[in-house]
């Protein structure tokens, strides 16, 4: 599997064979991830990125949806910080202090001032296949797709050059399931929340 998946990183779920899918987000090269999916999955990823030792900066227009998570993470340490759209300050990422930026900026996120760099990965959450999605997907090292409409599934299938059967499956995915794509490599992953994550975020859901 050519996904950037190994032993060093955060567990984003289990694949169809029940094996852990581990995503390495703390890396010395710039890394962009696009997730067409729900807030729940993005928030689980933020919590798990923080658990790997990364500082997480969330750029969002809906801060109340993130406040409880930011307060609960890190046991009082400010390991997840919230920022208004376009107001993320330079994070000073380094090997000893890696950073993950989560961009929760709606259908048309503005071009970010804070971009991926060494030891700084960017996860962009899109609720649906928006007009900017093809550009973001093209520049991303990893693309995740959760349940979408049949029309969106067909478009995504063309953009990602998916086999027809896989593209058609995208409109039938269960909550918590993501198709992760990197180049020609693809893997369906089910994200299973821990008890603590469920207590904080509720059950897996695609819609917010």
Image (cartoon, rainbow, N blue to C red):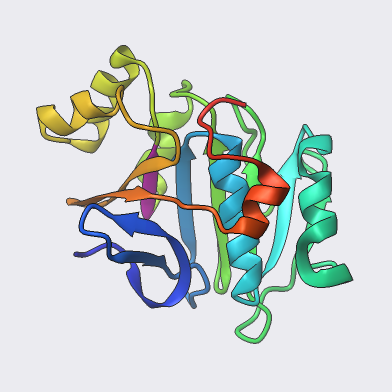
Tally of marks: 0
Q: Position of residue 186 (x, y in %)?
A: 22, 50
In reply to whether residue 65 is colored magenta, the answer given is no
In the image, farthest residue toward the right = 76
Give the residues in magenta. Answer: 141-145
In reply to whether residue 142 is colored magenta, the answer given is yes
Q: Nearer the viewer, residue 108 or 205?
A: 205
Q: Position of residue 202 (x, y in %)?
A: 65, 41
Q: Is residue 42 above or below residue 51?
A: above
Apparent side of residue 180 relative to residue 49 in the rendered image (left or right): left
Apparent side of residue 98 relative to residue 168 in the rendered image (left or right): right
Q: Is residue 14 above or below residue 68?
A: below
Residue at the spot 48% in from the left edge and 24% down from the top edge: 128
**The N terminus - image quarter:** bottom left
User: Is residue 90 something one can see in this rendering?
Assistant: no
Q: Nearer the viewer, residue 207 or 78?
A: 207
Prevailing secondary structure class for the magenta stretch in the rendered image: strand
Q: Is residue 204 above or below residue 3?
A: above
**The C terminus - image quarter:** top right
Q: Position of residue 71 (x, y in %)?
A: 85, 56
Quadrant of the rendered structure where residue 72 is? bottom right
User: Is residue 110 something one can see in this rendering?
Assistant: yes
Residue at the spot 68% in from the left edge and 54% down from the top edge: 114
Residue at the spot 42% in from the left edge and 65% down from the top edge: 23
Apparent side of residue 6 relative to residue 187 in the rendered image (left or right): right
Q: Is residue 152 above or below residue 95?
A: above
Apparent side of residue 5 relative to residue 205 in the rendered image (left or right): left
Q: Position of residue 52 (x, y in %)?
A: 59, 75
Residue at the spot 46% in from the left edge and 44% down from the top edge: 34
Quadrant of the rendered structure where residue 177 is? top left
Quadrant of the rendered structure where residue 134 is? top left
């Amino acid at each position: 599997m050519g996904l950037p998946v190994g032993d060093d990183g955060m567990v984003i779920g289990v694949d169809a064979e029940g094996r852990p899918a581990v995503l390495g987000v703390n890396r010395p090269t710039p890394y962009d991830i696009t997730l067409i999916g729900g807030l729940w999955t993005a928030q689980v990823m933020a919590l798990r990125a923080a658990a790997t030792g990364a500082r997480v900066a969330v750029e969002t227009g809906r801060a109340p949806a993130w406040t409880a998570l930011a307060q609960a993470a890190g046991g009082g340490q400010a390991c997840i910080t919230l920022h208004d759209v376009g107001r993320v300050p330079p994070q000073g990422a380094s090997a000893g202090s890696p950073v993950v930026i989560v961009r929760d900026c709606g259908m048309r996120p503005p071009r970010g001032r804070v971009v991926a760099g060494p030891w700084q990965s960017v996860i962009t959450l899109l609720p649906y296949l928006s007009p900017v999605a093809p550009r973001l997907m093209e520049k991303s090292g990893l693309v995740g797709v959760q349940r979408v409409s049949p029309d969106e599934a067909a478009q995504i299938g063309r953009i990602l050059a998916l086999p027809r059967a896989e593209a058609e499956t995208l409109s039938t995915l269960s909550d918590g399931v993501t198709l992760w794509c990197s180049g020609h490599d693809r893997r369906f992953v089910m994200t299973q929340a821990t008890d603590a994550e469920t207590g904080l975020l509720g059950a897996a859901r695609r819609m917010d």
